Amino acid sequence: MGFDQYHEPPEELPPATRTFARLCASLTEEAEAIGWYEQRLAVETDPEAIAVMRDAQGEEFKHFSMDLEFLLRRSPAWREIAEGVLFKSGDIVEHGEEAESETFEGDGADGEPAYLGGSLGIGSLKGALR
Amino acid sequence: MNHLLRSLAPISDDGWKELDDEARERLAPALAARRLVDFSGPHGWGYSATNLGRVAAIKAAPCEGVVGAQRRVLPLVEVRANFELALSELRDIDRGADDADLGPLDKAAHQIAVAENKSVFHGWKGAMEGIVEASPHKGIALGNKPDAYRRPVAEAVERLLHSGIGGPYGLALGGEEYQRVVEGAEHGGYPLLEHLRKIIDGPIVWAPGVGGAVLVSLRGGDFVFESGQDLSIGYSSHDGETVSLYLEESFSFHVATPEAAVPLS
């Protein structure tokens, strides 16, 4: 495993990007663990073992959700799209296409991406090098 | 179109991109508070108040048999820096000019960054309490000689540790103090900037608008800057010669752990 979450040389990446990459890696691991528990639960017959694994899988649900919320707070465009897709009934693909289009194709004559809302998109500078 | 009314301005898409890029370039180095405190949001222009999780008692009740309390909130402030640009300069940008005179925008960017820094570190009377005025620590004298800065900064670190406030720490330096540190070297030529970085295990930040210096913990959860509308350029009006624009943001600032900062002056 080591430092596999970095796709570029870590020393060239700003701290905020390294943190973002760590949480992306954590999100992946939590999703994998959820899938593993789902498979184990599907074949287990001992009720006590099932109860333990259900509890463990619940922990992974929590961890995945926390990782996702952190990443969405750091990525306005990702958050904008997620808000158009998550917790909605209806056609998932349709919602995804609409959310992507609304996020990146602008909301008016000045061509601003909607997720910026006309703002300069500066946000937090904690961890920025300069 | 939102409240910024940008599409009503006589400015092309290329012109807006140039103005936004210029503003980001000027603002980022000067926005010291955002490098040192937690940032929440942006929550949008319609967001008006920060939840403090507290209530105030209401003496009167609407009828017998009930009691009431009113939620306390911290209202956001709106800050605006107006500026005017010559339309001829904007037309030159459309022609490909890379040296358009955007001085008024640069000045407004610096002014609003100073306003943000001052509000966070020194407060805004009647609107919010700043880090320095909230800190229970007695200010430490920094002096005028940069080669004597090590001791007071180390003393400030020790004071935070003594209060149970963990690091890493960040040091906000006012304009004069920052210049002294950058120019300073100790006996043997070792840069003072590097030595101070090692002492605090964190960044040294240029903070225009800050008087003296402030050491703050970067561990998180101690200082919260809540953004409504993040910094944006909006449109006011225009005539045949000039266009009137403004830089604007809305925010609140809340100190959760007053002892997590030590002022130096």
Image (spheres, coloured by chain):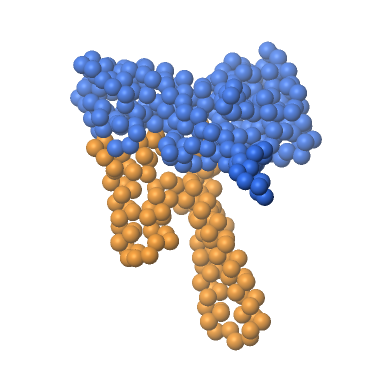
Chain colours: A orange, B blue
Q: Is residue A78 left or right of residue B259?
A: left
Q: Is residue B24 visible?
A: no
Q: Is residue B231 left or right of residue B127?
A: left
Position of the N terminus of chain A by quadrant: bottom right
**Image location of residue A8, percent across then percent down:** 46, 49
Given the current orientation, which residue lies at the most extreme right position?
A: B162
Instruction: Name the residue furthest bottom.
Output: A45
Residue for point 26% across, 20% down: B238
**Residue B167 percent location from the top left of the image:** 69, 39
Residue at 60 percent of width and 74 percent of height: A54
Name of the residue lying farthest toward the top? B144
Residue extending furthest front? Answer: B64
Query: Total marks drawn?
Result: 0
Q: Evaluate whether residue B113 shows in this view.
A: yes
**Residue drawn at x 38%, y 65% as measured from the top left:** A89
Which quadrant of the figure has residue B212? top right
